[in-house]
Every structure is written in structure tokens, then in C-alpha cells.
């Protein structure tokens, strides 16, 4: 371990220097006529950005119905990421990326734009002209080329600061001290078993002199049965086992996300059983047809397949797999996750103030006397 540390520490310093140099050379551009909110993190791996972006969309759709909403994403591993694209009302995750496709499927009225160069992509594809326009930068904390009005940084409560080191010695994208750039910090994935870590995390921030509004959040998961002929979804009440599933472990979870163990824990809680077989794949896994079909080996109608909403947008395009499920009479469940924020009223009052300040600044309302 000491040898490993000695070898990689210089590379970690080099990474920090190159990151600082890269960030310093980037010019910041203001997106015209838009209130820009960034959702990001400082660690490698899943912190729950996708459900948090969806939480923001749901909030603004409910409270600011006159506003158009855009989700602006890099479109990681998407074939059209380099040239940039706007997502149609359809399902082509290989072209647009799994997470942007998930956003578009869940919110058809929201404009979703992808591109490695988000400024150029936004300029080329934005179709919203109204000043009442909210742009959410998905994974935007390190993307300082775009000016943002509000920076939200998510920290996974299970390991909020990794091992304290940046890549390659650790999991940090940038030093913890850089959290001072944020406007608010949200610890995610808080459960009964790790709630004490939330208090420790807040104390660590305090010791580092990072005094920002800090909130905790957890996931509320629900299971939906997919009707494979129509792809319509039916909600399964929590803690209710599906008809056909036995206690001998006939649920089968397959997923390719950043933190599959957390998905497994969530599935166990949602389905009220720990008898779940599973197969984990790398984050953003493409799920080739032959791989999906191999999952069916030895499975029959007594097995119920389970996956995540993020995985489902890719799986549903594999027709031979869907037909094989139907032929074997295997049911399929999708786990959908929503964010629940502690002190939600306080957090949402910050969002409301953000909108009202934007409106005054841009002449959308009269300034208070």
C-alpha cells in the first residue's frame, strides 16, 4: 500500500495542476435569456445526479408552470455527443445517451440537449426564445465554461469525500476545498444505517471552513411492472411481493449504473425481500442483445426480472430480448427513484428566491419599492 501511495501521489499532484490549468484557461459564457442551475459532484461515480435533476424539473413544473425547462447534458457515450443534438420524442439511447433519454422519456415537454461542447450545442439547438427559461446543467460543477446562477453539489453520504485524494490516488475530481465554489451542498443516499455519517460530513465541511447551506436527502423508490406488449407501466405497492415470486430468490436484478450495490439495497427494501439474484454491469453499459439473452439462461416464468429506469431506456430497444421475455412469460419490473430532501421547504424556498431574483434582474416583474 505504501508503494502504491508513493507511486501515485506525484500523478495526483500532476492531475490537480492540469485540472487547475485547464479550468483557468476556460472562458465563461452566459447563456442568453436563461436561469442556469448546475447539478454536479466532486467525486467519480454515482451520487444521484439523475434523480436530483428530475426532482428539480418536477419542482419547477409544479411551481413555475409558465417557464420552459431545458436539461443540458454532455451525453456521455452518446454517438451524437460530439456533434451535439436535441432529443426527439422517441427512444434512441445509443444516439443520445441513457440519462438524457431517461429525462426525455419521463418529461416529454422538457427540452433535452446534449453535446461535448454544451455552449455550441445549446446555441445550435435551443428552440426556446422566452426569457422564462430554466436551464439545468446535468453534471455541471466542473463545466465552468457556462455561467450558472446557482451551483448545487451532491455528495454521496456513504463516502462523501472518497479517501480525500484526487484521481488517480483517490476518487475526487477536484480537491474538497473547491466546494467553496458551490451555492449549496446536498448529501444524498441517506438511510437509517448511515445517518450518522451525515452529521460527520457536515462537521468535516465546518472544519474545512466550508460554510454553505447544507441539506440531506434520501431516495424514495417505487417498482413498476412493465407491460411488454405496450410498454405501459403499473405501480406495484411498496413492500408487496409480485405474484409468481417465491422466497427462494426468484427475483433477478440486472443493472449498469455507477453504484449497483445501492440499487440492490433499494430493490431489497422496495420489494420486501433479500432473496434477489443479481448481475452487475459497468456504468452506462450498452446491453448488447446477446448479453441480455444470456441472462435468460435457466430462467422461467417463476423468475421476475428487475432493472432501473436508467437501464430500461436501453433495454426496451432490444426487441429480441423483449420477445424472449414474453415467450418465457417472464415479468419485468423497473425501479423508479425519487429524491426526498430533509427540510424540503427551506430548500425549495431557496429555489423560489432564485427565480424571483432572476425575474427582477431581467425585468420580468417590477422591482419592489
Image: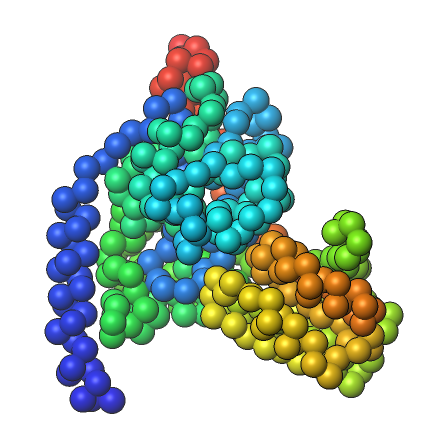
Q: How is the image coloured?
A: rainbow
| Residue at figure coordinates x 39%, y 13% from the top left | 363
| Residue at figure coordinates x 51%, y 63% from the top left | 286
The answer to whether residue 343 shows anywhere in this view is no
The total of numbered circles placed on residues is 0
x and y percent of residue 249 in the render? 74, 82
Does residue 35 lie above or below 296 as drawn? above
The residue nearer to you, when weighing 279 against 181, is 279
Left or right: 3, with 75 as reference point: left
- Image quarter where the C terminus lies is top left
Does residue 336 lie above or below 58 as drawn? below
Left or right: 48, with 28 as reference point: right
Q: From this viewpoint, which residue is outermost toward the right?
A: 243
| Residue at figure coordinates x 58%, y 57% from the top left | 314
| Residue at figure coordinates x 18%, y 77% from the top left | 8
Does residue 142 lie above or below 319 as drawn? above
The answer to whether residue 278 shows anywhere in this view is yes
Choose top left, top right, bottom left or bottom right for residue 43: bottom left
Left or right: 288, with 304 as reference point: left
The residue nearer to you, when weighing 13 against 325, is 325
The residue nearer to you, when weighing 258 against 265, is 258
Choose top left, top right, bottom left or bottom right for residue 114: top left
- Image quarter where the N terminus lies is bottom left
x and y percent of residue 62 in the render? 62, 32
x and y percent of residue 27 in the render? 19, 37
Left or right: 224, with 105 as reference point: right
x and y percent of residue 107 in the render? 61, 39
Amino acid at each position: 500500500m505504501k508503494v502504491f501511495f508513493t507511486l501515485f501521489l506525484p500523478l495526483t499532484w500532476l492531475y490537480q495542476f492540469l485540472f487547475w490549468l485547464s479550468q483557468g484557461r476556460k472562458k465563461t459564457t452566459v447563456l442568453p435569456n436563461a436561469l442556469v442551475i448546475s447539478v454536479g459532484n466532486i467525486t467519480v461515480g454515482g451520487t444521484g445526479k439523475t434523480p436530483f435533476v428530475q426532482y428539480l424539473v418536477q419542482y419547477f413544473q409544479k411551481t413555475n408552470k409558465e417557464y420552459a425547462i431545458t436539461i443540458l447534458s454532455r451525453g456521455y457515450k452518446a454517438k451524437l455527443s460530439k456533434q451535439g443534438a436535441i432529443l426527439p420524442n422517441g427512444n434512441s439511447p445509443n444516439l443520445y445517451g441513457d440519462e438524457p433519454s431517461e429525462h426525455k422519456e419521463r418529461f416529454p415537454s422538457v427540452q433535452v440537449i446534449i453535446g461535448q461542447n454544451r455552449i455550441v450545442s445549446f446555441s445550435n439547438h435551443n428552440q426556446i426564445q422566452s426569457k422564462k427559461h430554466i436551464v439545468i446543467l446535468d453534471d455541471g460543477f466542473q463545466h465552468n465554461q457556462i455561467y450558472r446562477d446557482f451551483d448545487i453539489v451532491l455528495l454521496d453520504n456513504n463516502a462523501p469525500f472518497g479517501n480525500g485524494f484526487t484521481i488517480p490516488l483517490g476518487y475526487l475530481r477536484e480537491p474538497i476545498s473547491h466546494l467553496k465554489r458551490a451555492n449549496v451542498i446536498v448529501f444524498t443516499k441517506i438511510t437509517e444505517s448511515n445517518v450518522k455519517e451525515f452529521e460527520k460530513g457536515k462537521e468535516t465541511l465546518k472544519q474545512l471552513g466550508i460554510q454553505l447551506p447544507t441539506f440531506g436527502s434520501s431516495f424514495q423508490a417505487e417498482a413498476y411492472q412493465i407491460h411488454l406488449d405496450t410498454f405501459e407501466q403499473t405501480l406495484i405497492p411498496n413492500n408487496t411481493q409480485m405474484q409468481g415470486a417465491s422466497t427462494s430468490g426468484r427475483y433477478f436484478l440486472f443493472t449498469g449504473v455507477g453504484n449497483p450495490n445501492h440499487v440492490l439495497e433499494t430493490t431489497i427494501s422496495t420489494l420486501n425481500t433479500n432473496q434477489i439474484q443479481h448481475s452487475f454491469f459497468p456504468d452506462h453499459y450498452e446491453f448488447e442483445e446477446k448479453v441480455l439473452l444470456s441472462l435468460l439462461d435457466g430462467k422461467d416464468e417463476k423468475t421476475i426480472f428487475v432493472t432501473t429506469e436508467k437501464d430500461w431506456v436501453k433495454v426496451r430497444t432490444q426487441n429480441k430480448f423483449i420477445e424472449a421475455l414474453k415467450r418465457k412469460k417472464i415479468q419485468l419490473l423497473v425501479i423508479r427513484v425519487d429524491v426526498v430532501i430533509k427540510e424540503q421547504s427551506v430548500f425549495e424556498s431557496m429555489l423560489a428566491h432564485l427565480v424571483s431574483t432572476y425575474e427582477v434582474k431581467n425585468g420580468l416583474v417590477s422591482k419592489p419599492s
